[in-house]
Amino acid sequence: MFFYLTLFHVFIISLSNYLVQFPISLYGFIFTFGMFTYPLVCLATDLTVRLSGNLIARRIVSSAYIPAVLISIYLSNYRIGLASGISYLTGQLLDIFVFQKIRERVSHWWCAPLCSTFTTTILDTYIFFAVAFIGISNQFLADNWIRIASSNLIFKLLVSLAIILPSYGVLLRRFSLIRPRS
């Protein structure tokens, strides 16, 4: 399971970093296609903490770090790979810490993934976009990185509420870790 979770992290990070290079505009918001895929990393991390503990989750994040950065550099560029590495490592280690602390204190299954994902998403998004796009030659991305990051953040948080959190609950039920309330 360790290998497959690590591979899943590498795949999602690499795909997201390739897709972040393509901005789209919708209803006055500027997004990148990477916002559709990246929230899955938080889902995988939170499930790993719940199923295997925070030590295994930290090992998976550490194991996925170098391959994900190298693949991201290959698929996009050095700056996106570096930004990804910094934001991924910082964000996912924070996610593990917050998830475990909330889980130890609150019995509702949804509190830990909700709080950790929201905290992580905010930090990760702004770190990534700042490192990736401040001062780059693409003037549009350099001038609009805060606007793009904020739009991506809003969407990622909505995706977390609408898709990731319910998926987390379904997967927990599948693994018989929570019981539906009668």
Image (tube, rainbow, N blue to C red):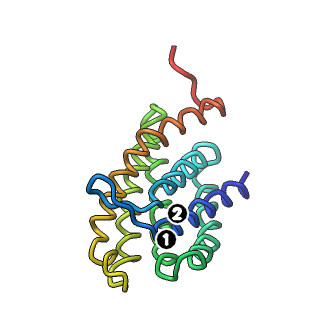
Q: Residue at x 47, y 61 (%)?
A: 34
- Relative to the observer, which residue lies in front, 22 or 64? 22
Q: Which mark is residue 56?
A: none
- Relative to the observer, which residue lies in front, 17 or 42? 17
Q: Position of residue 45 (x, y in %)?
A: 56, 52
Q: Position of residue 2 (x, y in %)?
A: 71, 55
Q: Quadrant of residue 9?
A: bottom right
Q: Residue at x 48, y 53 (%)?
A: 36
Left/right placement of residue 147 relative to residue 22 reads left
- Relative to the observer, which residue lies in front, 105 or 24? 24
Residue sticking out furthest to the top: 182
Viewer-nearest of discs 2 and 1: 2
Q: Position of residue 11 (x, y in %)?
A: 63, 61
Q: How far separated are the C-alphas under marks 2 and 1? A: 9 Å
Left/right placement of residue 58 relative to residue 20 reads right
**Residue type, mark 1 in image:** Ser
Q: Which mark is residue 84?
A: 1
Q: Residue at x 61, y 49 (%)?
A: 48
Q: Is residue 163 above or below residue 15?
A: above
Provide the secondary structure element on which disc 1 rests.
helix
Task: Please say if the residues under marks 2 and 1 sit with CB atoms less than 8 Å apart.
Answer: yes
Q: Is residue 81 above or below residue 94?
A: below
Q: Residue at x 50, y 57 (%)?
A: 38
Within 10 angstroms of label 1, few (less than 14), some, or many (20 or more) residues?
Answer: many
Residue marked by disc 2: 16
Provide the secondary structure element on which disc 2 rests.
helix
**Residue type, mark 2 in image:** Ser
